[in-house]
């Protein structure tokens, strides 16, 4: 079967660093997305990893290990506006994505 | 200019009715999708069209029928609405193999069936 696991909820402090993990078991792998979704809004694209390693984009970085079926999203210098759900999605094949349920990140002052 | 626009944003209707949700993208993408996000927040693919051709048709009741008049539009028609159809429906688009730019989502249509 296809499975993506993420923690349901995490809490962090403004200005701190947080790492959101994602593990996957899928029948195929053509890359992994991280998306941000604020309550009541559409998911917005954050990152795409297809090769092992770390991709850095400003305050956000995403890491992938294909052999371990593992990715994480690292958020630095947390701001209150980073409070949102973070969705991990694996591109299985032929435009088909399998989505995790998302990690709700709560930022406290 | 909105990249992926879907209408209506909110839809409240009675069981048994037929309704449509429209989606248009102005990004020049060749692939469009319909997703359903339920109360548990899982995003589930329903349909995918590439250049007006159906390429993904997940296990969805045949009450749901997508229509793509051209590659910039993908509409969703739902017949005989049921309570379980209540969810947020997202339209999305992408450019074929250029996955590095991700999928672009519309703002969603919150459907409530009463």
Image (spheres, coloured by chain):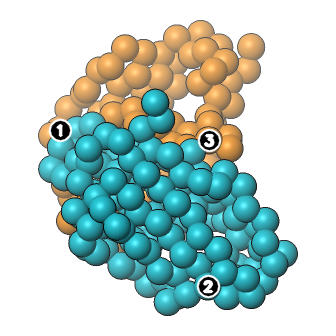
Chain colours: A orange, B cyan
Does the rendering let one see residue B114?
yes
User: Which residue does the image show at 47% across and 23% down from the upper left?
Assistant: A75
Q: CA distance from mark 1 to mark 3?
A: 30 Å
Measuring from the top left, give residue A83's x and y in whole percent: 64, 28
- For disc 1, the marked residue is A52
Measuring from the top left, give residue A3's x and y in whole percent: 40, 66
In the image, is residue B70 above or below residue A54?
Answer: below
Q: CA distance from mark 2 to mark 3?
A: 26 Å
Crowding at dot 3, Cα within 10 Å, few <14 / some 14-19 / many 20+, comes out as some
- For disc 3, the marked residue is A41
Crowding at dot 1, Cα within 10 Å, few <14 / some 14-19 / many 20+, comes out as few
In the image, is residue A58 above or below residue A4?
Answer: above
User: Which residue does the image show at 46% across and 30% down from the upper left?
Assistant: B1
Q: Nearer the viewer, residue B74 or B105?
A: B74
Does the rendering let one see residue A5?
no
User: Which residue does the image show at 40% across and 73% down from the upper left?
Assistant: B67
Q: CA distance from mark 2 to mark 1?
A: 45 Å
């Amino acid at each position: 079967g296809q499975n993506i696991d993420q923690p349901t909820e995490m809490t962090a402090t403004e200005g701190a660093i947080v790492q959101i993990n994602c593990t996957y078991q899928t029948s195929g792998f053509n890359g992994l997305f991280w998306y941000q979704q604020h309550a009541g809004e559409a998911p917005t694209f954050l990152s795409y990893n297809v090769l092992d390693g770390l991709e850095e984009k400003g305050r956000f970085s995403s890491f992938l290990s294909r052999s371990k079926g593992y990715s994480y999203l690292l958020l630095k210098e947390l701001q209150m506006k980073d409070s949102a759900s973070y969705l991990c999605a694996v591109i299985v094949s032929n435009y088909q994505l399998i989505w995790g349920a998302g990690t709700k990140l709560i930022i406290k002052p | 200019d909105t990249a992926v626009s879907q209408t209506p944003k909110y839809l409240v209707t009675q069981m048994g009715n037929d309704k449509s949700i429209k989606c248009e993208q102005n990004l020049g993408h060749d692939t469009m999708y319909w997703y359903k996000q339920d109360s548990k927040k899982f995003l589930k693919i329903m349909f995918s069209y590439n250049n007006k051709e159906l390429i993904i048709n997940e296990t969805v009741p045949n009450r749901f029928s997508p229509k793509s008049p051209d590659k910039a539009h993908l509409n969703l028609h739902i017949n005989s609405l049921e309570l379980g159809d209540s969810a947020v429906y997202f339209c999305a688009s992408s450019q074929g193999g250029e996955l590095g730019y991700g999928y672009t989502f519309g703002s969603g249509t919150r459907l409530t069936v009463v």
